[in-house]
Image (tube, helix red, strand yellow):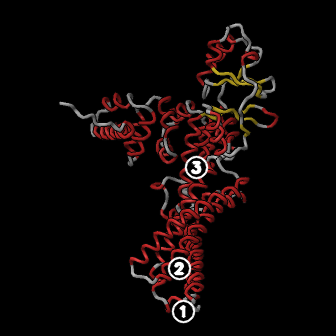
Amino acid sequence: MEVENTPVDIESECRSGCLRRFEEMSARVHELLEQPDDAKLNEYVLTLRPADVAQVAERLTDVEPRRRVFSLLTAPAAARVIEESRVDVQRALLRGLPTDRLRAILEHMSADDLADLAGSLLPDEARSLLDLIPEDAAEIRALMAYPEDTAGGLMTPELVRLRETQTAAEAIEHIRKRAPIAETIYYLYVTDEKRRLSGVISLRQLIIADPSAFVGELMDRQVICVPVTMDQEEVAQALARYDLLAVPVVATNHVLVGVITVDDVLDVVQDEATRDIQQMGGSTPLEQPYLQSRVWSLINSRVWWLLLLFVLQSLTLTIMDRYGAAMESVILLAVFIPLLIDTAGNAGSQASTLVIRALAVEEVRWGDFLRVIWRETLVGLTLGMVMALATIARALLMGSPLLVAYTVSLTILLIVLAASVIGGALPLLIKRVKLDPAVASAPLITTLADTTGLLLYFTIATWMLGLSR
């Protein structure tokens, strides 16, 4: 008897396994928190990764259980948990700590995470925090001077610098001494006496090289780097384009000032995706996670877009009022209005979504404007003809007169064409004026397509059916 092999969805199994593991961890911590003795809790927490502890801490809404779990960690482990936590959780965990404990944790945090933490605090709080680590304060204040959404605001100055005159053996020995405080050692950057970036070499290259070979002979002089002023989204694109684990950051005269690692870029990608999705939904991006945002912030992020869309949508009322006599003479025209405006909105949203994504991954640029318009014209015509045939069939099945069916089908064809072109062009035009193309959101495209669709519908109906306005 043959046994049927059931295919296993590895992706779903792994995802559910990770989720189940976290739920088990969270439940176990809650269970141990019920016990008065912290011995078993301490033993269990020590087995968890810092990211897991941070996620469990976020689930603990009460301050006291959070602090109880956090107090069991060594200073280095506590620093890693702080770095993995959201801003509101960071504040809750650090608030009220004894000075010596707080100082020990801060001393083990990386400079870029410290800068982010200090930047999220009030000025007096940030000053008090930096006073605890005076030897690092100047470096952190320098990082805080850069806008947070630039390469300078994202980088860490903790890196290993090599010289061209070092041998491979000397470089490896230097790395051993500097590695504990460096953000990454997979790539090593070579600078001259003025700290200007002159080359890059990987740790693998150094290990397999002849110990007596000079770094200057082994390094790659064609270094991919980014300026401190580059937008963080462009930095993420640079790492993705060249498949890098890290990228050096340079200031004036090509002076090496820091490095950005791929883990920081993953956070940027997530943040940028969140912002784009929120904008595409027709709202201003939130500064805090949804559940941590105040109700007023949620209202403020949406109300202005709703008002703008309301004003634009009111144009449809003007059009319908203008052609009111036409609808009264052929009442069947009104029946097809929902079908027409929904199709227009859907076609426009499809086109805009594809172009916005193409812009985000740099598949499309302003120079491709005419190509995009031409492609959307061809796509819109084809889709419009398909929808027109479906519309004729639908109208005839409803018992509509043949001339009305032709009117609606011709309108559908032109609406899909117009909506596709609008949806393709608008993101490019918005990008051209230095705005985020995600503001060409589905609600905005839908509103413009609806208005255009109604205007086309009544114009065609007036012409084909010989109606008065």
Q: Indicate the secondary structure of the residue bearing disc 2.
A: helix
Point out residue 1 in the picture as x, y percentages from the top left corner.
17, 30
Residue 463 is situated, as x and y percent measured from the top left of the image, at 60, 85
From this view, report whether residue 259 is shown above or below residue 283: above
**Is 430 or 408 nearer to us in this picture?**
408
**In the rendered view, does 56 fall on the left or right side of 447?**
left
Amino acid tagged 3: Glu
Looking at the picture, tell me which residue is in the foreground, 387 or 247. Answer: 387
Looking at the image, is mark 3 or mark 1 nearer the viewer?
1
Along the line of sight, which residue is nearer the eye, 150 or 247? 247
> Dot 3: within a 10 Å radius of its alpha carbon, few (fewer than 14), some, or many (20 or more) residues?
some
**Corner quadrant of residue 188:** top right
**Quarter location, residue 349:** bottom right
Q: Nearer the viewer, mark 2 or mark 3?
A: 2
Measuring 43% from the left and 31% from the top, which residue is drawn there? 49
Front disc: 2 or 1:
2
Which label is found at residue 408?
none
x then y, percent, for residue 56: 39, 41
Mark 2 or mark 3: whose residue is earlier in sequence: 3
Q: Would residue 301 be seen by someone viewing this image from the given angle? A: no
Residue 317: name its quadrant: bottom right
- Residue extending farthest to the front is 402
Label 2 to label 1: alpha-carbon separation: 17 Å
The circle drawn on residue 407 is 2
Tell me how far mark 2 sits from mark 3, CA to CA. Answer: 44 Å
Q: Name the residue under label 3.
A: 272
Q: Can residue 23 be seen in this view?
A: yes
Residue under pointer 1 = 325
Give the residue displayed 39% in from the left and 81% down from the top: 399
Q: In this view, does 430 lie above or below 200?
A: below
Is the residue 252 above or below the residue 148 in the image?
above
- Please state if 226 lies on the left or on the right of 347 as rendered: right
